[in-house]
Amino acid sequence: MAEQTKNLHPCTFAYDSTGRILNATQGSTSSTTWDSTLSTATFDDNDTPTGEALFSAQDSYLIVSGVATLRPYFTLTQATASGITTVTATLENPPATPPTSLDFIVAGSTVSSPISSGSASISLAIDALVATQKIDVIATATGFKRGRINVGGSDTPTLQAIAPNTAGNTSSTSYRVTTSSKAYAQGYYMGQANLTSMAQALSDLQVLVQVLVHTLYNTGGVVNSLTQSTYTPITLSANEKNALPDIQTNLLPNLGYTLDTIYPSGGTEVLQYASVKTVLPNVTKSAQDYATFVANTPGLE
């Protein structure tokens, strides 16, 4: 450090034998008790970097024998092609003997990657259902400041990374990034069907149940017709014989939707029936997609 008579905005730093800054204080240190195993150095506006600059970026520097030097660090970039996101970490300000590998950390998994020509890469296959979640990729190596890049959105993450050639990931090169939450996956696939809740789906589908009940059990319905003498009779059990007239008397009059009412001749469909026709195919597909996702994705909770 340069020796100056004027001491502006002093900041004092305590650092260990590797140069890592472990403690820092701005202004007077008269009331500060430092660990006796640590070394200390004070920087002010006359130093490079200045005390305040060093105070605001402590993890970017090492202090060796009172001299602050910029730590080696990584810059991370991303590129996406054919559905695969490649994150590349480039060594910056490397030491005389740079590391031969680094670790990528993504969705709780640590992946070692060899360094070649000053950089290393990881390939990610990001499932569509987590594309809006925050997906941080971190590069780290001993002595380096960590690099970080978000390759997703801003939603709260519920992530896991599945290694290549393992259950749930048939790729031989890319890590699959997906959700670890069944509840999140269910919400996503429900959203694909334009549903706001399972209650909405059940409300719409119960229309079909009511129509089915009416068709089967009303006085001109399937069950009643098949029990007439002009048809080959169906033998009903005592329980069934008891239930049929009760359904006709007490259930049918209370149905809100019947074969008679859902699409009257010369009229238009009732709103609920029109909704069923729109929703049902989507519900079916979404249910199938969700079932396929669960079957092919380990680690769900």
Image (cartoon, rainbow, N blue to C red):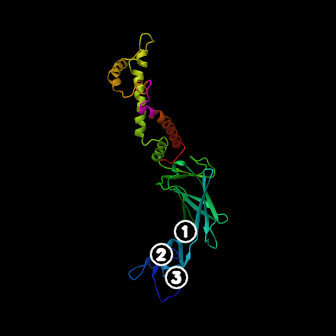
Residue at x-position 42% and y-position 40%? 198
Q: Amino acid at mark 3?
A: Asp
Q: Secondary structure at mark 3?
A: loop
What residue does disc 2 label? 55
Q: Is residue 169 above or below residue 146?
A: above
Label located before the other in sequence (2 or 3): 3
Magenta stretch: helix, strand or loop mostly = loop
Magenta stretch bounds: 265-274
> In the displayed image of the protein, which residue is found farthest to the bottom?
5
Mark 2 surroundings within 10 Å by alpha-carbon count, few (fewer than 14), some (14 through 19), many (20 or more): many
Circle number at residue 145: 1
Label located before the other in sequence (3 or 1): 3
Q: Amino acid at mark 2?
A: Phe
What residue does disc 3 label? 47
Circle nearer the viewer, 2 or 1: 2
Q: Residue 253: image x %, image y %?
A: 33, 24
Mark 3 surroundings within 10 Å by alpha-carbon count, few (fewer than 14), some (14 through 19), many (20 or more): many
Are the two marked residues, 2 and 1, in contact with CB atoms closer than 8 angstroms? Answer: no
Residue 242 drawn in magenta: no
Residue at x-position 35% and y-position 22%? 247
